[in-house]
Image (spheres, grey):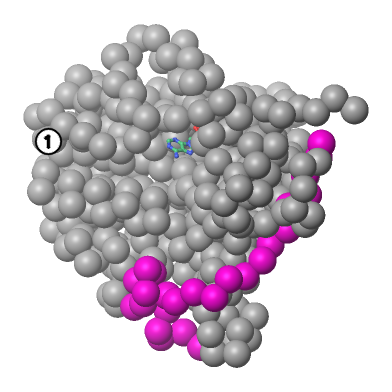
Amino acid sequence: MKLNTNSLSQILARRIINGGAISVHEFMSEALNHPEHGYYTKSNPIGRSGDFITAPEISQMFGELIGIWCATTWLKIGKPKSFILMELGPGRGTLIVDALRALKKLPEFLKTMELHFVEINPQLKKTQEKLLSDFKITWHKKLSDIPQKPTIFIANEFFDALPIEQFFFRNKKWYRRKVDLAEKKYQSEPKFTFIEEPSSLSDVDGQFVINSEWLNGSIFEFSPQSREVITKISKHINYYNGAALIVDYGYYEPNTNSTLQAIQRHKYVDVLNEPGCSDLTAHVDFKALSSIAKINGISCWGPISQGSFLRRLGIETRADKLSVSASKETKESIKRAKQRLINEDQMGSLFKAMVLGRKSSYPFPGFLSNDLSETT
Ligand code: SAH
């Protein structure tokens, strides 16, 4: 058998043989973002022919309603003379194209807007470039230097793609979950396995852990990059004004299970199998994100379910309007798409929406005053 020494499996196997087990974070990071073999650097994962479908790919209504959210939020932050619309992980650009189409009704918004994208995937960047050729766009590989202007941030299914660490609790002790080789020798198809190494939580912000009732076998997940991104966004809103809309799948109540998952061609696969070939994600810890925003002086509404968010933004009316002169089949498909986005047993409840902003900018569309989260 020919040995494929350049596959990511081989690279990681060599690293483990030479230096010992690697953290879940390192495994996930390399699987997603390795410069040559990472899932997000080498392929176009989204859509029917890819590995997964996202809300904007299901229906134009999603992006349009977010466009309306942006318009109202822009009014709420005081119609700044010049501002940035920044999307994190725009994928195929579908959400923003639908949003910008809805925003055509507000020429002043489009005239004063600067469009910025944070995108790591070169192929998706090309797709975005083509689709949005009428717009001047600034791309960033990561959220680093945001110009000093009010900014509206949009992130749909971005945070779930950021790598996590996992800690494991057993007999009152914490262990760091790591990835090792099942057999420590060179093989054409290395088999990876999880192990636990004694660890302390000193390198993790203890405050998010202490209050929870940890039982034997609990897993605590921690995404350093998500925390960095939220810190930057919150500081930016604090200094320069703006707001951020985050939509993703995740949890608010403490979670004690592994949420690491791998999807390939719309099916769940083993997370340790063929790193770089499947979409590896983890559920978003909304409580951690909202705590960090609040520590940085920013208020936080939600998370509320995607179903409630879209209903409050008027998805029913929008669906009715799109259906008026549509054929019977199109009417049916609009209805199916709407149900997929809002029904509890589909995306409506696992997916959640949260907004970060200044208290003085409230109310933000879709969020009620009692959605304000008060605790840190
Ligand atoms: N928002 C889009 C795409 C979601 S998929 C939609 O709803 O359809 C995740 C997106 O984030 C992709 O565009 C992916 O390339 C990008 N991405 C993932 N990890 C990233 C990282 N670390 N830095 C920048 N972009 C990243």
**Quadrant in which the N terminus appears:** top right
- Vertical placement of 239 versus 260: above or below? above
Residue 322: x and y in percent read 56, 30
Magenta highlight: main SS: loop
User: Does residue 12 appear to the left or right of 255 in the view shown?
Assistant: right
Q: For residue 299, what is the image quadrant?
A: bottom left
Whether residue 308 is visible here, answered yes or no, is no
- Vertical placement of 126 versus 174: above or below? above
Q: Residue at x 29, y 63 (%)?
A: 292
Q: Which residue is mark 1?
A: 148
Residue 41: x and y in percent read 54, 28
Q: For residue 298, what is the image quadrant?
A: bottom left
Magenta span of residues: 188-213
Looking at the rendered structure, the kind of residue marked 1 is Gln
Pick the front one: 295 or 168? 168
Whether residue 19 is visible here, answered yes or no, is yes
Query: Please, what secondary structure does the residue beneath circle 1 have?
Result: loop
User: Does residue 33 appear to the left or right of 273 in the view shown?
Assistant: left
Give the total of numbered labels.
Answer: 1
Q: Residue at x 63, y 66 (%)?
A: 258
- Vertical placement of 88 versus 217: above or below? above
Would residue 193 be counted in the magenta stretch? yes
Pick the front one: 371 or 114? 114
Residue placed furthest toward the right:
1
Q: Residue at x 54, y 69 (%)?
A: 176
Q: Residue at x 56, y 26 (%)?
A: 36
